[in-house]
Amino acid sequence: MESRIPRTSAHGLHEILAGVWGSGAENFRKGWSAALGAEWGSPEFARRHAEVAGLLAETIQQVQALPEAQQDRYSRYFPQWWTAVVQPDVGWTDSGRPARVLVTQETLDHLASAADLLQGTLQGTTSAPAGSNLEVLKESCASWLELLDQTADSELAPSLREEIAAQIRHLLWLIENAQLFGVARISRESTSVIGALAQASTVLTGQDPQTGGKWRRGFVSFIAASALLATGMTTLQTAIESGAGVVKEITQVVESVASSAG
């Protein structure tokens, strides 16, 4: 099953648009509902379609990081990819427009070509992760939700705590829907969570040593789990399991920075 998970955001976008295109539905609304596995008009449909727009935004951003000649070649298709996602000028229930006319085979082929190029160029990064171990990251997310729940209001502002928890729950939702949105979307979202945790760590107040220790260990474990997904390095897996190696080194750096800030 893992081999079927899209590796880049462009691959995820391609698979979803191809799913609408090949659904055989009589209109765009039914084609999108089939491809996203959610009922039209439901909160889940809105959430999933919004995520498709995010895949498009990431694809455009990554194409713009390619050499100029390749940028020029693939950027010509930005308007077609965008139109396929939002269809601004037509009714989604128009029976005269079956789902198959959402996008052309040529446009899909160019999107697939761009996706393959991005994977080869960005391999081993959050944009094209080399790893496939989602369980470690999932477990780290669950641990953080528990730790946040245990963090007192006097140590961290409730509004900040809930914001981070919402980000982590969104990451878990992406992991649950990996086959739809792909592993790159998960990897890139995990970096946003790292940033939020790092920021929160600087404003923890009055915490006892035990709480501070849990935060440091949790932060290091989350970084290692995210890096494992992006790079696919087996040494990181060993470090996570043993609590040594890279994880130990990162811990020492974090503690050193924390001591300096104090």
Image (cartoon, grey):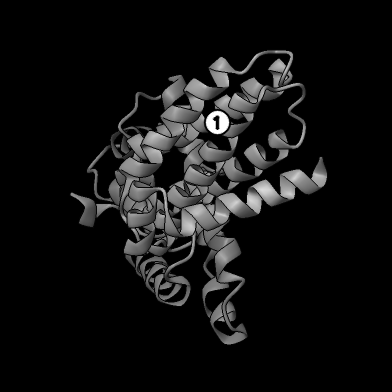
Q: Tell which residue pokes out farthest to the top in this image.
A: 153
Amino acid type at circle 1 is Lys
- Estimate the x, y position of residue 55 in percent, counting from the top left: 49, 51
Q: Secondary structure at mark 1?
A: helix
Q: Tell which residue pokes out farthest to the bottom in this image.
A: 69
- At x 22% / y 43%, what residue is drawn? 24
Nearest to the observer: residue 49 or residue 178: 178
- The quadrant in which the C terminus is found is top right
- Estimate the x, y position of residue 31 in percent, counting from the top left: 32, 38
Nearest to the observer: residue 75 or residue 88: 75
- Residue hosting label 1: 214
In this rendering, the answer to whether 213 lies above or below 58 is above
- Quarter where residue 153 is shown: top right
Circle count: 1
Nearest to the observer: residue 148 or residue 243: 243
- Left or right, 21 with respect to 9, comes to left
- Quarter where residue 44 is shown: top left
In this rendering, the answer to whether 6 lies above or below 259 is below
- Quarter where residue 156 is shown: top right
- Estimate the x, y position of residue 13 in percent, counting from the top left: 41, 53
- Left or right, 4 with respect to 202, comes to left
- Estimate the x, y position of residue 239 in percent, counting from the top left: 38, 55
- At x 55% / y 31%, what residue is drawn? 214
In this rendering, the answer to whether 146 lies above or below 191 is above
